Amino acid sequence: MDFPNCTEETQKRKITIKDPQSKNSKSEVLLANPQGITIKIVQIDGCVIKGNQQMRCDRLVIVPHQELIFIELKGKKIEQAFKQIVATLTYIRQACSSTQNHHIIGIIACTRCPLASTDIQNLKAKFRNQYHGKLLIQSGSVSHNLQG
């Protein structure tokens, strides 16, 4: 899976993912990379997938042979963010058959979480059952430890 013009490689032990062009400066994802493994951060929105024809999430973090982490930084439209992650997951799976053995994680970092906890639990269950992945939804900063 290679998107050279849209990918940054890093071995940093602490990685912060924000959207500097967004008014939404409160949402961020903090990734801990204690082993300093080389990971790829792919800019999906506006680089891999351009235009307004297709829904897509903001970023994809690739931990080689381990995890695919789909990230959406959002204000309060959680259901929209979920659809964007699913659309990108579907796109990547169709484009790259090598993704089948990766653990799938979806992360939605939002400024406000207006959905009831049962709605959030339903989205997490749907993601787990249909896409065999784990979905994290949280206001403000979302932290995740990378597998390596």
Image: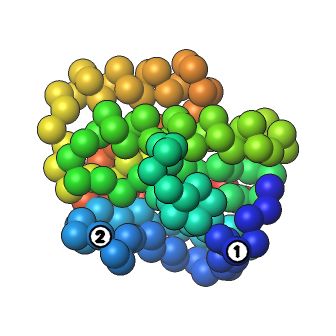
Residue in the picture at 60% in, 27% down: 131
Residue in the picture at 17% in, 49% down: 112
Image coords of residue 47 (percent x, y): 58, 65
Residue in the picture at 30% in, 48% down: 138
Label 2 packing within 10 angstroms: few (<14), some (14-19), many (20+) = few
Q: Which SS class for mark 1?
A: helix
Whether residue 71 sits left or right of residue 47 in the image: it is left
Label 1 packing within 10 angstroms: few (<14), some (14-19), many (20+) = few
The residue labelled by disc 1 is: 5
Residue in the picture at 21% in, 47% down: 76
Whether residue 148 sits left or right of residue 121 in the image: it is right
Q: Is residue 43 above or below residue 132?
A: below
The amino acid type found where label 2 is placed reads Ser
Q: Is residue 79 above or below residue 27?
A: above
- Name the image quarter holding residue 97: top right
Q: Is residue 87 above or below residue 17?
A: above
Residue furthest toward the right?
98
Image coords of residue 35 (percent x, y): 69, 71
Image coords of residue 61 (percent x, y): 61, 60
Distance between the alpha carbons at the discs numbered 2 and 1: 21 Å
Whether residue 49 sits left or right of residue 4 in the image: it is left
First-in-chain label (2 vs 1): 1
The amino acid type found where label 1 is placed reads Asn
Quadrant of the snapshot with the C terminus? bottom right
The residue labelled by disc 2 is: 22
Residue 3 visible, this angle: yes
